[in-house]
Amino acid sequence: PLYPPGENIWALLKDSRGQLWVGRERHGLSRLASGAKHFVHYRHNADAPQTITNDYVLNITESPDGRIWVATQTGLNIWQPATDDFRRITQVGDIALADISIKSLHFSDENTLWIATQSHGLLRWHITSNQVMTIDQAHGLPSNSVASVLSDNDGNIWASTLAGLTRIDPNQLTITALLTEHNGLAGHASNRNALHLSGSGELWLGATGGLTRFNPHKLQLPTTSPQIELTH
C-alpha cells in the first residue's frame, strides 16, 4: 500500500507498459507493475547516485521512446528498467539542475523536452545536441514560475504560470498570446499539474479561481491595444 495515509500526491502516470507511477510529496516515487498487488517504492539516498534526486516528486512523464522521466524539487531523473534504478540528469546545456525545482515535463517530439521550473522560467532542451533555450520574463513570460507545459494539436506550446496562461511559438520561442482572468480565465495563478489537452483538442486549466475550458484552435484575442484616456 501507499504510505502514510493523507500524504499529498502530486503526480500520476499510467505508462505504455500498463504500470502506474505515483509521485508523492515527501516519500518519493512508487510504481505498481501491471498485474502486481504491491507497489515498489523509490527513495532518495544521498550516498547512492542511482536513486532519485529528491523525495518530493512533482511530475512524471513518458518520452516517445518509452523512457520514464521523473521531475523532483531538485532535478531530473530517468528510470532504468533493466536495473530498476535511476540515472540523474544533473545538467542540461549550461544549466545545472541540482538547485532547480522542476514542476512539469513535456515532450513535443522525441528529441525536445520542455521543462517548467519553479523560478527559472521555461526551458527547451534539445536532448541530442544538448542545446537549451530559456524563456523567462526577459522574453515576455508573465512569471518565471511555470506550473505546467504542453502542446496543442496545432503544435503550439502552452505554459501556465502564476500570472497567466501563455501560448508560445515553438520555433521562434516568442509569446503569441497571454490569457489572464481579465480575458476569460478563472484566475490568473495556475495550479501545478492542472493543464490538460482533451481528446477533442480542448485545453482545460485549473487555476486559483476555478476551472477554464476552451478550444485553442478557435481562440480569438484582440489584435490592437486598448486606448488609454487620462481624466482629471
Image (cartoon, grey):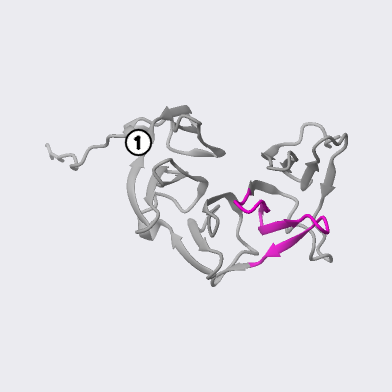
Residue type highlighted by circle 1: His
Q: Quadrant of the C terminus?
A: top left
For residue 127: magenta? Answer: no
Label 1 sits on residue: 217
The front one of 79 and 227 is 79
> How far across and down, in percent of the image, does residue 212 sit?
44, 28
Q: Is residue 38 visible?
A: yes
> How far across and down, in percent of the image, does residue 122 sit?
48, 55
Q: Quadrant of residue 152?
A: top left
Residue at point 39%, 43% (across, down): 154
For residue 68: magenta? Answer: yes
Residue at point 37%, 58% (across, down): 171
Q: Quadrant of residue 44?
A: bottom right
Residue at point 81%, 41% (across, down): 33
**Apparent side of residue 99 relative to residue 48 in the rendered image (left or right):** left
**Apparent side of residue 191 relative to residue 98 in the rendered image (left or right):** left
Q: Is residue 90 above or below residue 122?
A: below
SS for callout 1: helix
Residue at point 50%, 31% (across, down): 199
Q: Which residues are magenta?
A: 62-90
> How far across and down, in percent of the image, does residue 190 sit?
49, 38
Other-residue count near label 1 (Cα within 10 Å), few / some / many at <14 / 14–19 / ≥20: few
Q: Is residue 19 above or below residue 80?
A: above
The front one of 44 and 144 is 44
The front one of 108 and 196 is 108
Q: Is residue 207 visible?
A: no
Q: Quadrant of the N terminus?
A: top right
**Apparent side of residue 143 relative to residue 115 in the rendered image (left or right):** left
**Apparent side of residue 148 relative to residue 76 in the rendered image (left or right):** left
> How far across and down, in percent of the image, does residue 222 sit?
22, 37
